[in-house]
Amino acid sequence: MALVVYNTLSREKEPFVPLDPAHVRLYVCGPTVYDYVHIGNARPVVAFDVLYRLLKRHYPRVTYVRNITDIDDKIMARAAESGESIEALTRRTADAYQSDMRRLGALPPDVEPRATEYVAQMIAMIERLVANGHAYAADGHVLFSVPSMPDYGRLSRKPRDELIAGARVDVAPYKKDPADFVLWKPSADNQAGWPSPWGRGRPGWHIECSAMSGALLGETFDIHAGGLDLIFPHHENEIAQSRCAFGHGIMAKYWMHNGFLNISGEKMSKSLGNFLTVHELLEQYPGEVIRLLLLSAHYRQPLDFTPEGLQQAKATLDHWYNALRTSNPEPAGSVPRTVEEALSDDLNTPMAISALHQLKDPAELKAGARALGLLQQDPEAWFRWAPAGMSGPGDAEIEAAIAARQAARKAKNFKESDRIRDELKAQGVILEDGPKGTTWKRG
Ligand code: AMP
Ligand code: ZN
């Protein structure tokens, strides 16, 4: 089935034609790690995980790289504030991020590079840019010279005055042009830094992704993705660096951007008090509920994240898991055509979800859901899920009560067996007697 994707570069839907069909290469910008990530950060991860799964079904080899930015001024500030070392802070928060994303059903990328492991490649790339006249050193900094690239700005399509204003560039005396951006900056003795031809310092943010994608995917590759906010300046500047260092007309052939996630109609922010981390949400809902809600809107549209949306996603998954409960079949061999068609049309996940609702055969439902990374659990485990900190009986206690009820029934002591059932019900556990014995769920 032909895949069509919306390319931000052309502002159009285009057929996906890989540079090398034997090896498709995808890069997604990952988070800066200094705290738990918020639910907005999970949107690109989940949306482009669906893309990764789709590409893997259609091509023999796919390399997916998603980086971790583990050097940044926000990280340095947080470490200085708390006294934790940068190394410990970024390890701890990157581990939490990886575990949270796994719990959202995202497949691990093939490579998850940390920026600090690629400083040598960043320096080499900056040296190349200086050597070929696209960058200059000034005052311990190295800057990319925007006027040196005649077609700078093709991705964001910003006119020059907006480029300057939009970049929120401080007027720095060492800049030859106000639009020039930092590739390398000096570090004070008490700041993280690496030796370089321009003195001890650290990389700018944009050069990190150019160096990591260049090292792991090559000088040109197929798809580069991330959130809408990254189009300018981050992706525009990545393109400038990679194209000018490597001398190609493109960096990536297709640029894909997800829309923003809002909370109950408002922009998420710490000051509004509506800031939701994935970590805390996962204590209240199973990962698949959060994932289904994230996929319920098309990835390019804004997504409104609401408590009602979570309840609805939970109800949908309960319904689907119920359909699997009696037979729990192996997934069908291939993804049902209606689901594959929807996903092949620029990842139309809302359409794919409605196609899932039409499927009658549980084996097909399972295969279709797998394309979305859903229904990946054992149905019984699904119904036993409990939020963190929930009071009430644990699984073993419930199993013991069910066994006691069974014994009472066998002894025809129905008063006792009903008592046990009612007691469990009062504790939020519902028993269901079926042909295969008694199953239970937390209601
Ligand atoms: P950051 O750590 O801020 O660079 O963000 C990591 C990824 O999350 C980037 O691809 C951002 O575009 C994306 N992102 C950040 N906030 C949101 C949001 N509210 N909705 C959707 N995506 C977001
Ligand atoms: Zn990036």
Image (cartoon, rainbow, N blue to C red):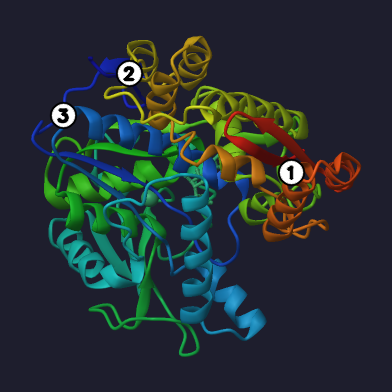
Q: Which residue is mark 1?
A: 410
Of 76 and 293, nearer the camera is 293
Image quadrant occupied by the C terminus: top right
Decide if residue 18 is in sight here.
yes
Q: Which residue is mark 3?
A: 18
Left or right side of 428 for 69: left
Q: Are marks 1 and 3 in contact (CB under 8 Å)?
A: no
Q: Earlier in the sequence, mark 1 or mark 3?
A: 3
Within-10-Å neighbours for mark 2: few <14, some 14–19, many 20+: many
Left or right side of 10 for 370: right
Count the marks: how many?
Answer: 3
**x and y percentages locating residue 305 in the rendered image:** 68, 33
Residue 324's place in the image compared with 67, above or below, is above
Name the outermost residue toward the bottom: 189
Report, in whole angstroms, how far the alpha carbon at label 2 lies from the one at label 3.
Answer: 14 Å
The residue shown at (83%, 47%) is 424
Of 321 and 160, nearer the camera is 321
Report, in whole angstroms, how far the alpha carbon at label 1 lies from the one at label 3.
Answer: 65 Å
Which amino acid does the dot numbered 3 rest on? Pro
Q: Earlier in the sequence, mark 2 or mark 3?
A: 3
Of 74 and 349, nearer the camera is 349
Report, in whole angstroms, how far the alpha carbon at label 2 lies from the one at label 1.
Answer: 55 Å
Of 187 and 176, nearer the camera is 187
Q: Which residue is mark 2?
A: 344
Task: Give the mark toward the camera: 2 or 3.
Answer: 2
